[in-house]
Image: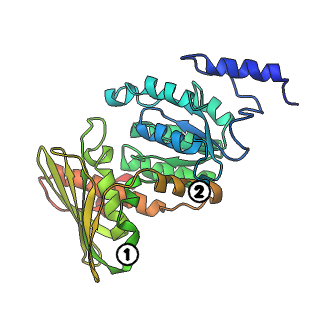
Amino acid sequence: MNPTLPDRRVFLQRAALAGAALSFPAPDWFPFSTGKDGKRVGIIGLDTSHSTAFVKALNAPGADPAFAGYKVVAAYPHGSRDIESSTKRIPGYTEEVKKAGVAIFDSIGDLLNGVDVVLLETNDGRLHREQALQVLQAGKRMFIDKPMAASLADVVAIFDASRKYKIPVFSASSLRHIKGIESIQKSQVLGADTFSPAVLEKTHPDLFWYGIHGVETLFTVMGTGCKQVTRLHTEGTDIVVGTWADGRIGTFRGTRTGKHEYGGTVYTQNGNVVLGPYGGYDPLLKDIIRYFDTGEVPVTPEETIEIFAFMEAADESKRRGGAPVTLESVLARVKQ
């Protein structure tokens, strides 16, 4: 039986208290006016601008019909607790999403009681394995924002859990949809050079934190099949050269000086295609919504694992002074 209207008002008054978090389980009817059954979205992590961007897109009056009526109704704010650039965002982003009708919970378990699908947005990849496991055990479909994890081992473990619980998951950078990429036919690609910022964060492997954007752009056009990498590293720049099994070469340039931009050049049998500029979050969000609806992932686990093996091999190449490192060798270490 649904509660009376005064009961509902009491619940919502408690949810709206400034700075307060919901520490009690959500009732069966929650949220009774902010989302349709099957389309209630929960966010884990309010320490990244991606969270507020997704809330703005999904909860906007007259939201894009491509978002199929999905609404963000609840969020758990944490989130990194020791990365200053992330933790300092949480209070402001929490207040921002509350104004969009999002209830704030103080545990992932309570959040999962009131949502149907999950955006795992925590900026700190070290937390993703533990947080993702809770979502999978609850049987919820989930998108995992970048970086999928802070180690190759955790990436593999998350996909292992996905298979165990029979819940497909995917992770992707919005740079998969950089301008120009829609015209690329992978069968025609001879090679590619991509670039993005590669700001370092001491708690994560070098490229996992931000360089992943440009690495994922590289794999989006080149596809899987990279066999080995070599890395040239200076204080301001990384250049990673990947050799694919068919002899093609793809390179990633990560920058830490100058203006932060994203782009690249794709070399095809029909000519060269320049990538850029960055096109925003909406194309990725449409991929996420299609996945929520169908359970079909736009990026395979095999490709995502190879992307992280590429970055892990790049780290190993740096440790070895730029020597070539095979992806097979870093994957074998994880399996052991």
Quarter of the picture holding the N terminus: top right
Q: Secondary structure at mark 1?
A: helix
Residue at 31% of width from left, 43% of height from top? 209
Residue at 37% of width from left, 43% of height from top? 150
Query: Which residue is the extreme one toward the right?
Result: 1
Tag 2: Cα neighbours inside 10 Å, few (<14), some, or many (≥20)?
some
Residue 233 lies left or right of residue 280; in this view the side is left
Q: Secondary structure at mark 2?
A: helix
Mark 1 or 2: in front is 2
Tell me the amino acid under the disc marked 2.
Ala
Residue 155: numbered disc: none
Relative to 6, residue 283 above or below: below
Residue at 26% of width from left, 35% of height from top? 202
Relative image position of residue 19 (x, y in whole percent): 54, 17
Relative image position of residue 207 (x, y in whole percent): 27, 48
Q: Quadrant of residue 59?
A: top right
Q: Which residue is mark 2?
A: 66
Q: Is residue 243 in view?
A: no
Q: Which residue is mark 1?
A: 186
Q: Nearer the viewer, residue 199 or 182?
A: 182
Q: CA distance from mark 1 to mark 2?
A: 26 Å
